[in-house]
Amino acid sequence: MPVVNRINAFAEDMTAWRRHLHGIPELAFDCHETAAFVAERLREFGVDELHEGIATTGIVAIIEGQGEGPTIGLRADMDALPIQEATGKDYASTREGKMHACGHDGHTTMLLGAARYLAETRNFAGRVALIFQPAEEAGGGAGVMVEEGIMERFEIAQVYGIHNVPGFDEGAFYTTPGPIMAAVDEFHIHIKGKGGHGAMPHESRDPVVAACGIATAIQTIVSRNHVAAQDLVVSVTQIHTGTADNIIPETAYINGTVRTFDRDVQAMVMRRMQQIVDGQAASYDVTAELDYEVGYPATVNDPAKAEAAIAAATEVVGAAQVHGDYGREMGAEDFSFMLEKRPGAYLFLGAGEGAGLHHPEYDFNDEIAPLGASFFARIVERAQPAGGK
């Protein structure tokens, strides 16, 4: 397969890029050193346009193809996580409490590999927009780049992204038409009662039992308020209250996450959660305030673009390694903001055995980087063939 072979010719360079990036992890929008490294490589490759400082540290680079045609967008995320690395690698993070525990260093490398190939060969019509995005983990950098107008400014007609997945077959691609990842919201509930002595609870208004009642009642949203055939997750993940065994505290705090695919289901959860919080607060004679934060929307693949992605991936790794009916999962991804604005597809790329994402011993598998880069190259050449073939 010529694309794989050509990109494999600089696979060692890609490994070096990735390991350099792995050593300098940066969080959220503060990807200044990462972006500078990316920009330097793109200049070396000879991209036609380089636009920096989008969403603080985001980059969009343009490569012109042969003749007129639309613009196809390819996206990679650049940010790391606030985790202390425990891999023991000689290229491990040099930043205390920060590491690339999700493989965004690998995603950036895959797109750099595709950029080098595409700038060299230009075997496509129209243009390619290379999107290097900060703040996927927190802050919704994709949404900010969309709000700052990248789709309109660069006339992007379709857009594609990849995420590596440890535990999936190495080098295999997974995607699906339609929804592939859920919308993610979070909720915060602040409860205020009246503190007192643990031996005299009748003189208090106990926020602890109120918190327990609210947390339990919230679980009925999934079990009793929605159609079982629709995917929905409501998880209480934190309850904080109290300081001692003989003191009834004044306040309590509840936090959790909601995952949905359907906006009507999301609206139902918001309505029922408010009703539960208000009703439970009244029943326990406390006050409670719900702060419901709508986060990333569902990641929804355009069916036709998903089929195009499956065809491109098949050319790279063969049909046996491409799973086009993967289905959907309850994780979330801010690439969803880009897919809300333009048709496209999101794919998973199997990384083989190893520590899971967001684990302190995780490390990106450099062997799959040429495959991701090759997919990006083939989706461009197939979607916008040179000479209109």
Image (cartoon, helix red, strand yellow):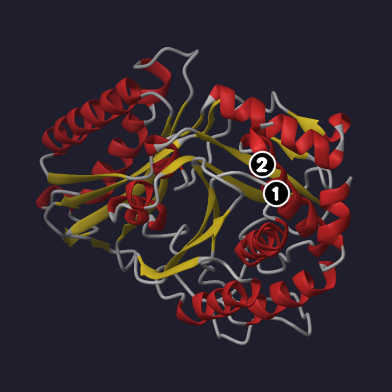
Left or right of 210? Residue 73 is right
Quick one: label 1 or label 2, which is nearer the N terminus? Answer: 1
Task: Say what amino acid the circle numbered 2 marks.
Answer: Ala
Q: Nearer the viewer, residue 280 or 37?
A: 37
Q: Residue at x 12, y 44 (%)?
A: 286
Left or right of 94? Residue 332 is left
Left or right of 57? Residue 68 is right
Is residue 175 visible to the viewer in this orientation of the structure? no
Q: Circle 1 sits in a helix, a strand or a loop, which is it?
A: loop
Q: Nearer the viewer, residue 175 or 90?
A: 175
Q: Residue at x 15, y 45 (%)?
A: 288
Indicate the position of residue 108 as horizontal and vertical percent values: 61, 64
Between the residue at mark 1 and the residue at mark 2, the CA separation in whole angstroms equals 6 Å
Whether 95 is drawn above or below 199: the answer is below
Indicate the position of residue 188 as horizontal and vertical percent values: 27, 49
Task: Say what amino acid the circle numbered 1 marks.
Answer: Asn
Whether 42 is drawn above or below 8: the answer is below
Q: Circle 2 sits in a helix, a strand or a loop, which is it?
A: helix
For residue 386, the mark is 2
Indicate the position of residue 172 as horizontal and vertical percent values: 80, 41
Quadrant of the drawing holding the C terminus: top right
Left or right of 213? Residue 142 is right
Q: Residue at x 57, y 80 (%)?
A: 40
Whether 374 is drawn above or below 303: the answer is below
- Residue at numbered disc 1: 123
Labels 1 & 2 near each other (Cβ < 8 A): yes
Circle 2 residues within 10 Å: few <14, some 14–19, many ≥20: some
Is residue 310 visible to the viewer in this orientation of the structure? yes
Circle 1 residues within 10 Å: few <14, some 14–19, many ≥20: many
